[in-house]
Image: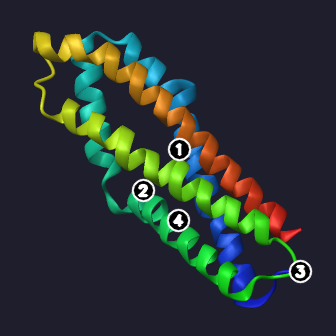
Amino acid sequence: MIDGPYYVLTVLGVLGTGLVAGVFCGFSAFVMRALAALPPAQGVAAMQAINIAALRPPFMLVFAGSAVLCSVLAVVTFVLWPDQGTVELLLGSALYLLGCFGVTMVANVPRNEALAKLDAGTPEAAAYWPTYVSEWSTWNHIRGVASAAAAILYVLALT
């Protein structure tokens, strides 16, 4: 069984990846649907405001902090190679780092940056909005599932 500081790191990994999964689940379940139902100018303006608010320390600490924690867990697992939980810890770390953090950087952030360059009330913003909602939401589902799966794998590593 995992114990000591390694146990604490794993529990923190469960909490961090689980919290991030919850945020992304909320966006997939209702936030993006609600924004898509608004007139494009209002949806664009609201999402632009959300994207700015997301960069504040409370979310970034959990999101980026979980990536750091997953990296530490992966390295420690390679170094210690515990008798139990090795596969779960390595898979959980890979899922969060690639499926959540990586997807965010290569799929969601570029779309957010493109949206930020548009004035909400313009025809260009209205034309881009349906594509943005569809593509951003698809990638959000993937990172949400990856985060949740990482949390579950970390819990399994503890059992």
Question: Dot 4 lies on which element?
Answer: helix
Relative vertical location of residue 151 with respect to residue 32 in this rendering, above or below: below
Tell me the SS state at disc 3.
Answer: loop
**Quadrant including the N terminus:** bottom right
For marks 2 and 4, the one nearer the N-term is 2
Numbered mark located on residue 59 in the image? 2
Q: Amino acid at mark 4?
A: Ser
Q: Secondary structure at mark 1?
A: helix
State how far apart marks 1 and 2 are (Cα).
Answer: 9 Å
The C terminus sits in image quarter: bottom right
Give the spatial CA distance, label 1 vs label 3: 30 Å
**For residue 23, which numbered disc appears in the image?**
1
| Residue receiving disc 3 | 1
Mark closest to the chain's N terminus, 3 or 4:
3
Q: Are marks 3 and 4 in contact (CB under 8 Å)?
A: no
- Dot placed on the residue nearer the N-terminal end, 4 or 1: 1
- x and y percent of residue 61 in the render? 43, 65
Q: Residue 111's quadrant in the figure?
A: top left
Answer whether labels 1 and 2 touch (C-beta < 8 Å).
yes
Q: Quadrant of residue 11?
A: bottom right
